[in-house]
Structures are given as C-alpha cells and as structure tokens.
Amino acid sequence: MLKGKDILSTYQFNMQELDLILNTAAYFERKVKNSEKIDNCEGMVFASLFFEPSTRTRLSFETAMNRVGAKLISMAGSESSSAAKGETLEDTIKTVDGYVDAIVMRHPMIGSAQIAADIANHPVINGGDGAGQHPTQALLDIYTICKEKGDIGGHTVTFLGDLKFGRTVHSLGYFMQMYGNKMIFCSPNALKMPEKITNDLRARGADIIETDDAAWALAQSDIVYVTRVQRERFADPAEYEKCKGVYIVNKELIAKAKQDITVLHPLPRVDEIATDIDDYEGSAYFRQAHNGLYVRMALLALVTGRV
Ligand code: NCD
C-alpha cells in the first residue's frame, strides 16, 4: 500500500494506511524486544540528510535503518556538504538519489520535502520541512497515544505553546481530527495556530477551542501536547524574548489538571516542562521519543516494499 510512496505530510494518509503503519510498528517493536533477527531491508542503502539540527529524528531514523538491516549514508549539518559551497537542494537530491534506495531529509524551508520528492525516483521521507510538516513525528505521537491511552480517539487534547511555528502540531492536528478528538489550542496570541490550519480542520468537522488559559485547558484535557517556543523561526529576537517561558508545565499545574492527564512533548524541551514532573506517571515524553524507533523502522520497510 505504501511501497514507493513519499511520506511528506500527515494530510496524505487514509485510515487504512495508518492502521498498516501502526501495526507494522508494533510488529517491529515486538521483534526488537524479543531480540529477533530483522533483515527486511538487507542489501539496501538509505540516506539520512539533515540540513537542520536534530537529535531524536536523525538518531532514531539512523538506528531504524540499522535495525531493519540496511546500510546508511549520513549528512548532519549542511556545513559538511556541498550545500556550504552553494549547491542547490535539487542538485544534492539528484545526486544522492542515484546512490540510495530511500532518502530521509530535514530542511529549514517549508515545501523542501516536496521539492526533493519531485526530483528523486526513490521514496523521500520528510523529517521536518521548516515550520511546515513533520509527519513521522505525528505518526509516533499517535502510536504513543494508542499505547498510553488504549485508543487514539475520543480524547480532549490540548496543544500548548508555539502553535504558529511548531511543525509537529501542524501535522498532528489532522490526525487528531481524523480520529475524532476534541482539540484545545492554547497559546499566546502571537503564537496562535495558523488560521489556514484551524479553518481547514474546522471545515473537516473538527471541534476546536482556542484559548490562552493553560490551567483551564489542562483541567478539561486527557492529553496535553506541549511544544517548545521555536526560537530559530523568529525573524525578530525581541519577539522571541516576549514569548519565551509563557507556559511552564510543572507539578503545580498538573495538580490542577484533569486526573490521569498524559503529557506529551516532541522534545527537545527548553523550560516548558519542569523536570519536577518527569516522575509523574502520565509524563510520556521519553517513552514517546523511544517509540519513534519502531514507527520509523515501519516506515522504511513499508516505503521500500520490504514488509
Ligand atoms: C521537533 C522538531 O524538530 O520539529 N523535534 C523533534 O523532531 N522531535 C520539535 C522541536 O524542535 O521543538
């Protein structure tokens, strides 16, 4: 179903494809946990091209490449590649596409993954295109919600923080609507979810409330998805200074939240989740990061037709 396909945006998926990805991730999770041999992508080489900083996305993808039995070539930071000499993205992709069986790419420009996919003959997986989309994060987010809550739908989910520049929430909003969750978008006015996204989700039938009151939002929510204020996307550093540190999820706020609230965050965190809730049992952000491995193994095996 996904063989030969690019993974560019959450909006490309139907329910059947999501079921397939989640089931395949669970299959790989079982295999890894049982230390079973996994050789689905043996004989293949994958490229990991990161033109923007990354810890989890790059390292979990590269671990996934190794764990499905493939080999990989890797570029972390554009300083070490010909991008630093002024080579265009198009030329880099054209070249790398000739070396490998699939390309995972992160790039600061919105739409860059689509550009790469248009050029490459092999599947391109978007590991984040600027403030655009981050579909593989949203896939691991729903995998995590399913494991933590037993069900992906039927919840009230608050997105908290930088909803303007945070690509993870741009991607996840669509899945939350698909699975029938209520959403609360909680942000300072300057960092509201782009109107285009909110209007589009509402047109698809989403139930969305917008607020800047975090205590109120968390009191209604089964899940809070916290995001970092995306400093690198602000044109004016003074604007960042005004917005940083607006929300801090700590013990005090959790005490006022709905009982059993699950706390998610794509990570890295700066100060928006205090370490004093790390041992709260609903704090799932490190489990969430761990789940990324299995979801990314599934994606690599599926787009290369090796499952
Ligand atoms: C996120 C990203 O890069 O968009 N990180 C991630 O992939 N886990 C979130 C962020 O950087 O704030």
Image (cartoon, rainbow, N blue to C red):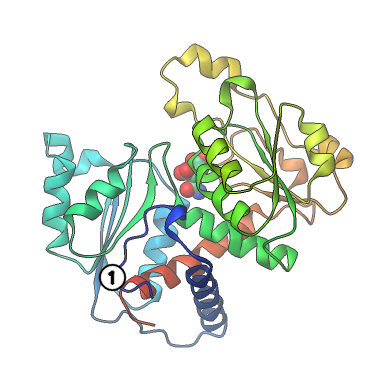
Residue extending furthest toward the top = 238
Crowd rating for badge 1 (residues with CA inside 10 Å; few <14, some 14–19, many 20+): some
Q: Position of residue 30 (x, y in %)?
A: 57, 81
Q: Nearer the viewer, residue 35 or 144?
A: 144
Total labels drawn: 1
Q: Relative to 286, is 19 on the left or the right? A: left
What residue is at 41 percent from the left and 52 percent from the top? 9
**Secondary element at tag 1:** loop
What residue is at 43 percent from the left and 36 percent from the top? 131
Q: Mark 1 points at which residue?
A: 4
Q: Relative to 307, is 160 on the left or the right? A: right
> Cβ(mark 1) to ligand 1 < 8 Å?
no
Please indicate, yes or no, whether residue 103 appears anywhere in the rendered image.
yes
Q: Which amino acid does label 1 sit on?
A: Gly
What residue is at 54 percent from the left and 77 percent from the top? 23
Residue 187 sits in quarter: top right
Q: Nearer the viewer, residue 141 or 66?
A: 141
Please indicate, yes or no, whether residue 76 appears anywhere in the rendered image.
no
If the image is split into quadrants, where does the C terminus sit?
A: bottom left
